[in-house]
Amino acid sequence: MSSPEAVSAPRPTEPTHVDLRVSVGTVALKNPIIAASGTFGYGIEFAPIVHLNRLGGLVVKGLSLEPMAGAPSPRICETSGGMVNAIGLQNIGVRAFVSEKLPELRRFKTAIIANVFGKTISEYVEVIRILEDAEGLAAYELNISCPNVESGGIEYSTDPKLTSAVVAAARKAAKRPLWVKLSPSIGIIELTAKAAEAEGADALVVANTYPALCIDAHNRRSRLGSTTGGLSGAAIKPITVRLVHDLHRVIHIPIIGLGGIESPSDVVEYMLAGSSAVEIGTAHFVDPRASEKLVGGLEMWCRDERVFEISSLRGSLRT
C-alpha cells in the first residue's frame, strides 16, 4: 500500500467556461461582436432571423437631423474580396428613429449604439440633443467621415482641427459615452485619433470604408450611381488591422476594430492588434446571421486554443 507521501496531488483543472465579456470604456458588452452601422438596418429588421440578445451590441443606421433619401442607384458593386457601396447615408431622421425604432430596440438586452452625423457641427449637436432625451442607448458613434458644408466640403476626419471641433461639441452635448468613427486615411489617422482623444472621445472605431471607384469597361461609366463609393470587406482587413496596431501604441482609449471580419480568427487578429471589440459589416450581405454565428464560433475558437478570458488577447501581439 502506498504511503500518503506517495499519493500525487490532484492536477488543477482548466476552466470549462469561456468568458467572452469585454468592455469599451464604461460600456460593458457580453461579447466583443457588434453589428456595424449601415449593414444591419436599425437592428429590429433582423430580429426575425437573428437572436439579437446574442450580440455584444449593434450600431444603428446613421442618423441625421432630417430624413435623407440617399444616393442614386445602383448603390452596391461587388469587387474581388469585398464590395464598394455608396448608400448616401439614407435614413429616416433622428426624430422618427426615437419614436418608431428605439421603443422596439429597448426590448433587447444588447448594447444599442446610435451612429450620428451632420453636415454642420450644429447638426451633430442637435441630433445628440434629441437622443439625449430618449432612453435605451448605450453610446453614440460619431461618424466624422461627412463633408463639412461650412468649410467647403472637406471631411471632418481629414483635418485634425475639424475633428477637434466636432468631437469637442459632441462631447459637450453628450452625457453618454462617445465613440468616434475614423476614416482610414493613411498618414493622418494618428493625428485625427489624437485630436479625438484630446477632446474627450471615449473610444475610437477604426475604420470606415476606403475611397474607391468601380468602372464598367464596356460602357465606360461608373458602376455606382454616385460615381465613387467606399470599399469594404476582406480585401481591406490587413490594412485596417495595421491601423489598429499603430493607433494602439499611441492612444490611451479603447479601439473597436472594423473591416473585413468574416471568421473567429479575424476577430482575434483585431484583438491581438489592440482592439477591445470589433464591428461586423460586409459579412451581413453574405449572411444576415454573420454576427450571431461569430459569437458561437469565437467561443469555440477560444476553447480550442485554451483562451478562457477573451479580454486577455487585447494588444498581445508578439513582435
Image (cartoon, rainbow, N blue to C red):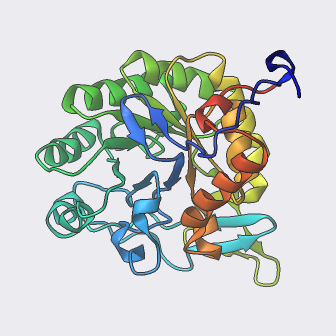
What residue is shown at x 34% (from left), y 71% (from top)?
Answer: 44
What residue is shown at x 83% (from left), y 15% (from top)?
Answer: 5
Regarding residue 240, the answer to whether it shows in the image is: no
Left/right placement of residue 209 relative to residue 27 reads right
Left/right placement of residue 16 relative to residue 86 reads right
Q: Dividing the picture into quarters, in which one does residue 51 lie?
A: bottom left
Q: Nearer the viewer, residue 198 or 153?
A: 198
In this picture, is 130 found above or below 105?
above
Quick one: quadrant of the N terminus? top right
Where is residue 3 shown, x and y percent of the image?
85, 20
User: Residue most toward the front?
Assistant: 1
What residue is shown at x 26% (from left), y 35% (from top)?
Answer: 176
Left/right placement of residue 199 relative to residue 213 reads left
Q: Dividing the picture into quarters, in which one does residue 143 lie?
A: top left
Q: Report how many numbered discs are placed on residues in the image.
A: 0
Where is residue 6 shown, x and y percent of the image?
87, 20
Q: Nearer the viewer, residue 55 or 167?
A: 55
Where is residue 54 shown, x and y percent of the image?
46, 60
